[in-house]
């Protein structure tokens, strides 16, 4: 059982002792005096306004990310946005990787320049007022981020020493599904399927199977192992580095699309062929082994795959 009563406590560092309250308004005011903003929207407004001001001061703009903002709002009681900096050399790493580590691991807000490119400044939302104006907080966060970014840079540099094509045998070590073979087996199916779809639609008969062959190869790269959410995106970078055709690289990045209702659909011919192959293979494979979605469970995201197929077909007429 949980004991409840008319006493509470304020911010764990910026207040001390118990607080007695008599009604809700009193509760809210006394918590505020003890450095806890009770209302979520109040915390959100402060984070948004002060972050915007800090970005403007740096001549930069905030990278919009509603989900991250919502998460930060829930992590702090007394938000204090501060600006941190990292070395410009890390900007050589693809910005998707940098943003991924900043938001995923550290909950930092990325700052972009006027061209929409990532800058080497970021915003960290502290839960604390410090005597030095946040200098130590910023220094500590910069140190932690530097370690993460140097990992990312190390893997990025390592990965490019090896061609995407040379990674295909390693896909034999990854099981796609017990009854549907390895990822390498799946890639063979995608290769045939993408070729057939491309021919049916009158697309480039060589680029689509090539993109399908390489579309899962980045799964064995160091960057994707560390940051799984950049799969596909990294494949595009590696393919361009390997001098593959631009449309092949683009299809590698786009073959997972659309991921959810708010995501855009591929419109380039090679991307369409590979994205359709990826989804149709999953649908046919899982239905064939009787792993159909139910009212409450869809572990293999087959509904998303089916809706993706429908959207790709309708939106590209």
Image (cartoon, rainbow, N blue to C red):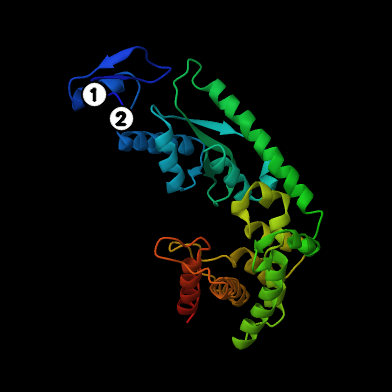
- Report the residue at 76% width, 52% height from top: 159
Quadrant of res 87: top right
Q: Nearer the viewer, residue 5 or 19?
A: 5
Identify the residue shown where x is 43% and y is 64%: 261
Residue 188, compared with residue 236, is above or below; it is: below
Whether tag 2 and tag 1 are in contact, CB under 8 A, the answer is yes
Q: Please give left or right for residue 21 compared with residue 149 in the image.
A: left
Q: Dot 2: few (<14), some (14–19), or many (≥20) neighbours within 10 Å?
A: some
Residue at the spot of label 2: 38
Residue 89 seen by the camera: no
Neighbours of disc 1 within 10 Å: few (<14), some (14-19), many (20+) = some
Report helix, strand or loop for mark 1: helix
Give the numbered dot on residue 203.
Answer: none
Residue with the mark numbered 1: 27
Which one is earlier in the sequence, the residue at label 2 or at label 1?
1
Q: Position of residue 154 (x, y in %)?
A: 75, 43
Q: Horizontal and vertical percent for residue 156?
A: 73, 49
* Tally of marks: 2
The residue shown at (64%, 29%) is 143
């Amino acid at each position: 059982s949980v004991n409840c009563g008319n006493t509470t406590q304020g911010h764990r560092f910026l207040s001390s002792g118990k607080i007695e309250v008599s009604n809700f308004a009193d509760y809210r005011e006394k918590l505020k005096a003890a450095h806890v903003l009770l209302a979520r929207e109040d915390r959100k407004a402060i984070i948004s306004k002060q972050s915007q001001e800090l970005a403007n001061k740096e001549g930069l703009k905030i990278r919009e990310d509603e989900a991250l903002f919502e998460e930060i709002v829930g992590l702090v009681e007394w938000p204090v946005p501060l600006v941190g900096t990292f070395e410009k050399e890390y900007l050589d790493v693809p910005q998707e990787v940098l943003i991924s580590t900043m938001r995923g691991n550290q909950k930092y807000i990325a700052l972009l320049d006027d061209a929409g490119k990532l800058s080497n400044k970021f915003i960290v939302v502290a839960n604390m007022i410090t005597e030095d104006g946040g200098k130590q907080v910023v220094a500590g966060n910069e140190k932690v981020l530097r370690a993460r970014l140097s990992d990312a840079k190390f893997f990025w540099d390592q990965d490019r020493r090896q061609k995407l094509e040379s990674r295909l045998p390693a896909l034999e070590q990854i099981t796609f599904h017990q009854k549907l073979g390895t990822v390498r087996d799946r890639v063979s199916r995608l290769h045939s399927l993408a070729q057939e779809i491309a021919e049916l639609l009158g697309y480039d008969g060589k680029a689509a199977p090539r993109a399908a062959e390489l579309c899962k190869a980045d799964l064995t790269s160091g960057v994707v192992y560390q940051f799984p959410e950049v799969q596909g995106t990294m494949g595009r970078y590696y393919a361009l580095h390997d001098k593959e055709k631009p449309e092949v690289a683009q299809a590698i990045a786009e073959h997972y699309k659309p991921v959810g209702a708010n995501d855009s659909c591929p419109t380039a011919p090679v991307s369409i062929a590979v994205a359709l192959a990826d989804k149709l293979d999953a649908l046919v494979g899982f239905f064939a082994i009787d792993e159909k979605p139910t009212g409450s469970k869809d572990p293999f995201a087959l509904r998303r795959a089916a809706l993706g197929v429908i959207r790709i077909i309708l939106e590209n007429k």
